[in-house]
Amino acid sequence: MPRITAATVAEHREQRRDALLDAAAQVLREKGDVTVGAVASRAGISRTAVYEYYNSAADLIADVLVDELVAWIDHLEAAVEGIDQPVDRLRVWVTTALSYVADGRHALVRAAGHSDLPPVRRAQVQELHRRLASSVTGALAELGVAHPEQQAAYVWSVTDAATRRIEAGLDADQEIESALRFILAGIESA
């Protein structure tokens, strides 16, 4: 019987789950792929113990990805909170999103996103991706841009292109500035 180090069994299970997520994130960053054995080894527990929490490596990866996307959404929403001018919110959103990429945190999202997730979990991740751009859609609607959802998709595409370029090693500041110029010029002509 494993020793419980928390005040309650529920707290112990939560601590163990957090340790498994941390271990999975580390393995994913280092290897780009997660196996139950690698996570168990990193967390210092048996493979069977991992299966007490997760049915598969895909479920574990899904939780890592969901946690990271929620953190990214929270980060973006906090960055644009209280900014009255929609064009300023858009600038801050793009800059914050691409700074997240530049500081390396997006690598986990990218690596986990290439995993074969169960359909229900894939849908959950796709919904979180849509939430990422909700601030953009709102700002575009406030600016009176026709078809704000369509234009938000274009903003996302430019941001995604800049993401790939930053991850390829190009200068982040230049990529952020170029993406902003391109996006703002497109919005002015929309």
Image: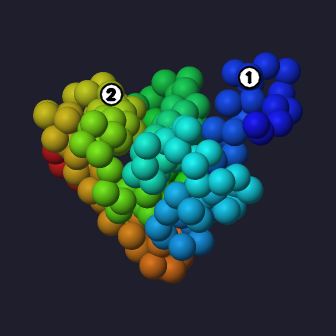
Q: Quadrant of the C terminus?
A: top left
Relative placement, left or right, of 122 versus 31 is left
Is residue 14 shown to the viewer in this render?
yes
Q: Residue furthest front?
A: 1
Dot label at residue 138: 2
Measured from the top left, where is residue 24 in percent x and y?
A: 58, 55
Q: List the residue tagged with mark 1.
A: 9
Closer to the observer: label 2 or label 1? 1
Q: Could you tell me which secondary element the residue under label 2 belongs to? A: helix
Q: Residues within 10 Å of mark 2 (few under 14, many from 20)?
A: some
Relative placement, left or right, of 64 versus 178 is right
Measured from the top left, where is residue 142 in percent x and y?
A: 30, 25
Up/down of 57 relative to 190, above or below? below
- Distance from disc 2 to disc 1, alpha carbons, whole Å, reads 43 Å
Q: Residue at x 70, y 21 (%)?
A: 10
Q: Earlier in the sequence, mark 2 or mark 1?
A: 1
* Residue closer to the observer: 5 or 95: 5
